[in-house]
Amino acid sequence: MKLTRRNALALGGAAIAVTLVPVNATFAATDLTMADIAAFTGGAEVGEGGIELTTPEIAENGNTVPIAFSAPGAKRVLILADGNPSPGVATFSFSELAMAEGSTRIRLATTQDVIAVAEMADGTFTKVSKSVKVTIGGCGG
Amino acid sequence: MISRRDFLQASVAASAIYGATGWNRAAAQQSLTQDKLLEFDTTGNVTLIHITDIHGQLKPIYFREPEINLGMGAVNGLPPHVTGADFLKLFNMTPGTPEAYALTYQDFTSLAKSYGRMGGLDRAATVINAIRADRPDALLLDGGDTWQGSYTTHHTQGQDMVNVMNALKPDAMTSHWEFTLGIDRVNEIVETLDFPFLGANIFDSEWDEPAYEPYKMFERGGVKIAVIGQAFPYMPIANPGWMFPDLSFGVREDRMAQVVAEVKTKGAELVVLLSHNGFDVDRKLAARVDGIDVILTGHTHDALPEPVMVNKTMLIASGSNGKFVTRLDLDVRDGQVMGFAHKLIPIFSDVITPDVSVTKLIDEQRAPYTGQLSEVLGITTNELYRRGNFNGTWDDLICNALIDEREADIALSPGFRWGPSLIAGQDITREDLFNATAMSYPNAYRSEMTGEFLHVILEDVADNLFNPDPYYQQGGDMVRVGGMGYSIDVTKPQGSRITDMTVLKTGELVDPNKTYTVAGWASVNEDTEGPAIWDVTEAWIKKQGTVTIDPNTSVKVTGT
């Protein structure tokens, strides 16, 4: 398995205060995200199913959010953090014999969708997205 | 609100099992005696006893149930999001009865004078012993939030509660506020316990490995029982994560499914989840993870006189502060729950005879502190209560104290669900003040915030309560605000719920660009500076002598 770090900031990094920007609960993928997906797929259509993404519902620490994916039979998996200034997080590549699964920790600037796109062995693409909430915290009754 | 008929159809009546619950009109008409409170139609082969969210309350207390408890989205109007007169109607109860006093807020002070305080672990001990006399191998399960919430619990770092609970001999517990004692203290206590401290969702964050036992297998009445623990999922977010830096929590639905499968492989015929998720999170979990027979819910302090069914899972809500003990008898045959009997037993402290050995043990825990506990700080002309989605009078009092003593424009007090009530005309003792404030990060900060930042805070907290998806509700009740009013439409998305933020003393709208002096307490940030909230509030109460809290109409709620 080869991990390409596309964005050093995204994987851990210094403890920076969570950016407190009012956000809406629903998100349309940003232009930057759409561009990253298009670059990954070469513009091919992206379906759904065949890929699982595990994220916490609410980040315990927005600076290091554990995520895991599983896409049996995938050749490559692209991970994106849709609400970050630079959405690209990592691309995982798998040999034919490898289990197409992986996990990493990413930094999320604010509440947003985390997206995983997989290129399957037959050259088709599939996608899954999960909302992860980043909150100021406190007030736990 | 749904009708009783719909509720029953959606719950017990629709299930394939037969069952009985202990609250009905006939019971309400009977006089209040210990025998009547304990009366129970012993059923099946397994008995579970559930107590949860005691919050350090060794002695009987008053606890006013919420007036406003909104359910969002699909659970709007479903129990436990039914209060007051609607609650009485739904459960066929009559205003003014002991049941109405125990389970709702109306006429609280006058009913409290008739029916007295509730709870007290020496009374709970009597009830537990009576159940064990009837069913010697009953399981006693503690849902957590046990080692926090009082003067003596604070000063003994939870040891008073540990000592008294040990005398009740629980079979397992789970946790939430326990971790605010700090990880070292928690582990020090856990090593001494004769029963497991369960949490299937507690992981070591560095190695991503389970940090505590996930479940315990029991054999009772010839039935193999798995009790799985689920700690409060949002621990490092809602409470200070720096106090237990290497732990990770979360709902972890997949993990729960995996643990349920594991216990079934080990032969479990009955799967019980001892949970501190909160009612709505448990309701969602029950709908998404198969194989759990009973969820003993906690965290949200709901007291329901009947189980709520979700598919084949029975949800039990046993209240808080030692006010209630639930007895649940189950008829388990061939790995299936064929029937049940359930009773939410109200602990009327003047009716149930205390267990003398436990009374003695409680008195021993309190003896070193009696002078401190009993000192009268002032008198309240109002009921003082906290529970409810928006402001309660206890927090209005605390906010007034913060504004005056810390010379602030605006005060914030966290929406905790714990904190017993005082009735109108009662002395406020130091013990009462600590019951509403005792915790391990009490510093009352004073800082400058822009209007825009205040809005962000209110929106953030509101979404942690009113997000329509329970898995995104990490919060307590809404943060309580002094010196500022606002309007809230609970149905809007985060960022647009809160409008019309107004400075009460001038009547002017809060200016996003202007800076305000804000005082508050219970910040989850490390190194928060300021005096303890109980010192700030005590000084203020003593200056007032007699405390009167004006009716609070500064929060306008829509979308309910």
Image (tube, coloured by chain):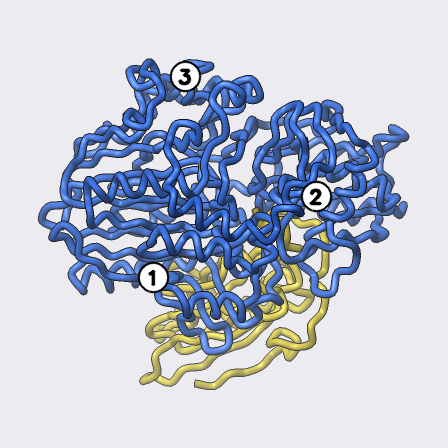
Chain colours: A yellow, B blue
Residue at 30 percent of width and 36 percent of height: B309
Residue B428, given in percent of the width and then of the height, sits at: 68, 34
User: The disc labelled 1 sits on which kind of residue?
Assistant: Phe
Q: Residues within 10 Å of mark 2 (few under 14, many from 20)?
A: many
Residue B170, given in percent of the width and then of the height, sits at: 34, 53
Mark drawn on residue B89: 3
Q: Quadrant of residue B377?
A: top right
Residue at 47 percent of width and 48 percent of height: B362
Q: Are marks 3 and 1 on the same chain?
A: yes
Chain assignment, label 3:
B
CA distance separating discs 3 and 1? 40 Å
CA distance separating discs 1 and 2? 36 Å
Disc 1: which residue: B195
Mark drawn on residue B527: none
Q: Can residue B91 be seen in this view?
A: yes
Disc 2: which residue: B413
Residue at 78 percent of width and 54 percent of height: B531
